[in-house]
Amino acid sequence: TWKVDKCIVVLRGLPALYQVYQGRENPSTKACMEQDVKNSLSMADVVIVDDLNIDIAECSEVANAGETFWRDEGCLGKVYTVNFGCRNEEHALTLNARTWRPLSEEAIRQLYKKYAELEPELQSLRNVIIVDPDI
């Protein structure tokens, strides 16, 4: 058994984290996210990033922030990505309506199309677990 000191679990759905921040005055979303990950890892052994609007590149950025923290702190860590699969467009619109900063319906429809195109790529990534959201 391989033991780790710290763990990040990314729960992901539709891609669009940066789209949520477009037009806002804070240009440093990535820096804020990295600092959030480091702060969270310093306080907890398991960090859950629950963002329905995170895309694959942003998952890598979360992983990189974690790896930097683990290297600086001299501890072992692992990133797991839980991808909620089997969603349809209507479900995506319903989930978006529940978020505290919903995107437009048109944006969600476009993002869902990209999401569906990424599904085969997700299945090939070693740290991704695909979960049926209706379990």
Image (cartoon, rainbow, N blue to C red):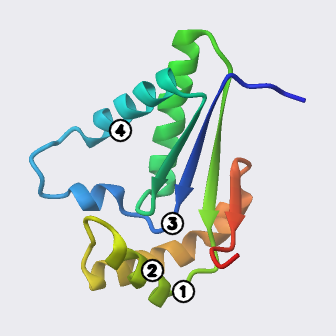
Q: Secondary structure at mark 3?
A: loop
Q: Secondary structure at mark 4?
A: helix
Cβ–Cβ under 8 Å for marks 1 and 2: yes
Q: Earlier in the sequence, mark 4 or mark 3?
A: 3
Q: Is 2 above or below relative to 132? A: above
Q: Going 60% across and 28% down the picture, which residue do you hit?
A: 45
Q: Position of residue 23 (x, y in %)?
A: 12, 57
Q: Secondary structure at mark 2?
A: helix
Image check: 32 left or right of 118?
left
Q: Which residue is mark 1?
A: 88
Q: Secondary structure at mark 1?
A: loop
Q: Earlier in the sequence, mark 1 or mark 3?
A: 3
The 10 Å Cα crowd at callout 4, few under 14, some 14 to 19, many 20 or more, is some
Q: Going 19% across and 58% down the picture, which residue do you hit?
A: 22
Question: Foreground residue, 63 or 8?
Answer: 8
Cβ–Cβ under 8 Å for marks 4 and 2: no
- Total labels: the figure holds 4
Q: Which mark is residue 92?
A: 2
Q: Quadrant of residue 75?
A: top right
Q: Which residue is mark 3?
A: 13
Please, what is the three-letter code of the amino acid marked with disc 4?
Met
Q: Going 55% across and 56% down the picture, which residue do you hit?
A: 11
Q: CA distance from mark 4 to mark 2?
A: 24 Å
Q: Which mark is residue 33?
A: 4
Please, what is the three-letter code of the amino acid marked with disc 2?
Ala
Q: Quadrant of residue 128?
A: bottom right
Q: Is 49 above or below relative to 103? A: above
Cβ–Cβ under 8 Å for marks 2 and 3: yes
